[in-house]
Image (tube, coloured by chain):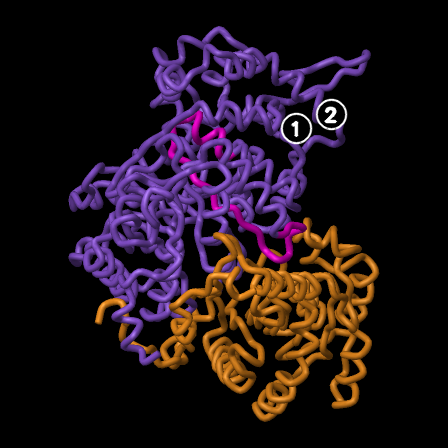
Amino acid sequence: MPKYSHTVDQKVYRFHDLRDLLAKASPARSGDTLAGVAAADYEERVAAQMALAEVPLAQFLSETVIPYEEDEVTRLIIDRHDAEAFRPVAHLTVGDFRNWLLSDLATEETLARLAPGLTPEMAAAVSKIMRIQDLILVAKKCRVVTAFRTTVGLPGRLSTRLQPNHPTDDPAGVSASVVDGLMYGNGDAVIGINPATDNVGAVMTLIHMLDAVIRRYEIPTQSCVLTHVTTSIEAINRGAPLDLVFQSIAGTEAANRSFGINLGILREGYAAARSLGRGTVGHNVMYFETGQGSALSANAHHGVDQQTCEARAYAVAREFSPFLVNTVVGFIGPEYLYDGKQIIRAGLEDHFCGKLLGVPMGCDVCYTNHAEADQNDMDMLLTLLAVAGINFVMGIPGSDDVMLNYQTTSFHDALYVRKVLGARPAPEFEAWLQRVGIFSGDAKILADTAPGLFLDGIRKLGV
Amino acid sequence: MSDIVTPNMWQVLTRFTQARIGLGRAGTSLPTRPHLEFQFAHARARNAVHHPLDEQALRVALEARGWPSFMVRSAAPDRATYLQRPDLGRIPSDASTAQLTTFSDAGAEFDIAIVVVDGLSAFAIEQNALPFLDILMPELVSRQLTLAPIGIVRQGRVAIGDPIARALGARLVIVLIGERPGLSSPDSMGIYVTWSPQQGTTDAQRNCISNVRKDGLDYGEAVHKLSWLVSEAFKRQLSGVMLKDETASPPQRLGRTGHNFLLE
């Protein structure tokens, strides 16, 4: 017996259960079609959205999309739900909730108090009946501020992860990109390397190197080598000066298992990083990456649409009070997000859902060469996310990741969006940029001549 | 013009990385020259994705070397479908399936099937498959391994090698496939080795050699690695995660600079 239905002009649209309704109500994307869960046509999709709008939010607490007994992420969501925080919206339907979010009742303060009362499925549901301007407007009202050696997410600030990847982790090659990024005012969220191997020795070499650079030049930022959490734990055990523990996470227990993790392993990683006490202005120590389609790609989606799976990953993230959470939106390829239109919408959905749930969202505004997307699409998503108040984006030399073979936002892109919107880097980092002369005075613009900071080392190269 | 663009004084660092550093700035934006160079690189990668494999030319070249071949179409009818439905790229079309049964009905049996697949870059196949096979084929023949006719696939994914090899009665399949084009590597060929390929074979049961191209892993090196994998697969009757490549990997051979100008 289908549980949900909606009638338009005497035609009855039926939906088997909440999971089916959420999937069919999801704005079109290739991954849901690939999974066989998408609406059959345009009308069925909107009929599903109409049916979804009438579902009480409280229904999401009794009808799970993946059974409680089968999935530890579902258990986390249900067990951690804060009924008191939920109370202000407990009587609303999904459609009413959209109105509430857009209204002046939803302020920075009320949204912050509400976050622990919302489940990822509630956030996903309301996002499915929101337009892009809604996703921006509400996300802009949410504020999630985190801190380690810099403070990220403050009003009027936009931070970047400096991503100095090199195909063989060559120290000089990595450093060359670090210099380029710092001189363009990037790196206040983190200097984060995707290593070429997961080998613990190689990872430790990179951690030591970044730590030495940060200390030598007194840069108020943090480093991260984006390796498996178990490798980070091992590095910590061997005495590595590790700032942030990284891990890719997903919204189902089975997908996390395919990543070689579970909540217990994440707790170990969190405890290991906290034990080092390396933060100065704050103690958020986790860096997570997510992305729509990861559960499907691991064949671990349980028939749940990819956007709802993604929102569930934020429930995993918020359990560990992360410093940074980054949706790598266009990396996975066109079988999940086909073109610029789908990537742009997905990036804004992820940012909205994450922020609504109290997660410090950033976005890897990116695409691969087999997606129907280009730099113009990335400019649009970057601009829209910055307007929506995103905490951080990536910064890479010339948009070209020569190690991972995809395109993300460049150092120049960060300066563009800061200039257009008057956004500034994290305050601690901004003060350093001014002190060392990368930014000239109060104008917050790049100095015309390179400061002497790195020039000694560069001169020795025999220019 | 040069007054308008602010150059970067650390251009000397480009010797350490292929990354696009030291591009200079117009205001704080990307100057025209590096902007258009990027656009061209992306255009070339896009062409690589959408360029149709000239399967006829490949077939003629193979026949000229005395290597029989046949063509296969995947179940993905066009490029747009192919890009969104990887599942269809893993199975032959109905017509090709019917054609493949003629091999199995004839009781074909071989040690090795070689399957050449356009994948995400037909450029990679057009530029690398023949020179690679010119080194590989004599090597395999010298080991007295029996080789099936070479399959040439359009709109295919790696796993389409499985049903093809099965129809050919092959114990092991070698798939040459165009990899996802990077901005600086639109022509990179991947090689996958699978022992006892069949329906339901997973990627964990395959070994991969990546980035085979003129400016990447060279053909001789790739054949060296592949020969080792093939020998070990026949010896141990398996492939995949249980069979780790024990030949030295390129990063170890690349001789790092070792030092770091930022810390000296």
Magenta stretch: residue A354 in it? yes
Can residue A169 be seen in this snapshot? Answer: yes
Residue behind mark 2: A44
Quadrant of the image containing the N terminus of chain A? top right
Can residue B160 be seen in this snapshot? Answer: no
Q: Which colour is chain B painted?
A: orange
Secondary structure of the residue carrying numbered label 2: helix
| Residue B5 x, y percent position in the rendering | 51, 61
Q: Which colour is chain A painted?
A: purple
- How packed mark 1 is, by other alpha carbons closer than 10 Å (few <14, some 14-19, many 20 or more), is many
Marks 2 and 1: in contact by CB < 8 Å?
yes
Camera-nearest residue between B258 and A122: B258
Residue behind mark 1: A24
Q: Quadrant of residue A271?
A: top left
Subunit ID for the residue under disc 1? A
Three-letter amino acid code at the position of disc 2 = Glu
| Residue B222 x, y percent position in the rendering | 52, 81
Subunit ID for the residue under disc 2? A
Q: Residue A331 carries which label?
A: none
Quadrant of the image containing the C terminus of chain A? bottom left
- Above or below residue A105? Residue B175 is below
Task: Magenta stretch: give its range.
Answer: A350-374
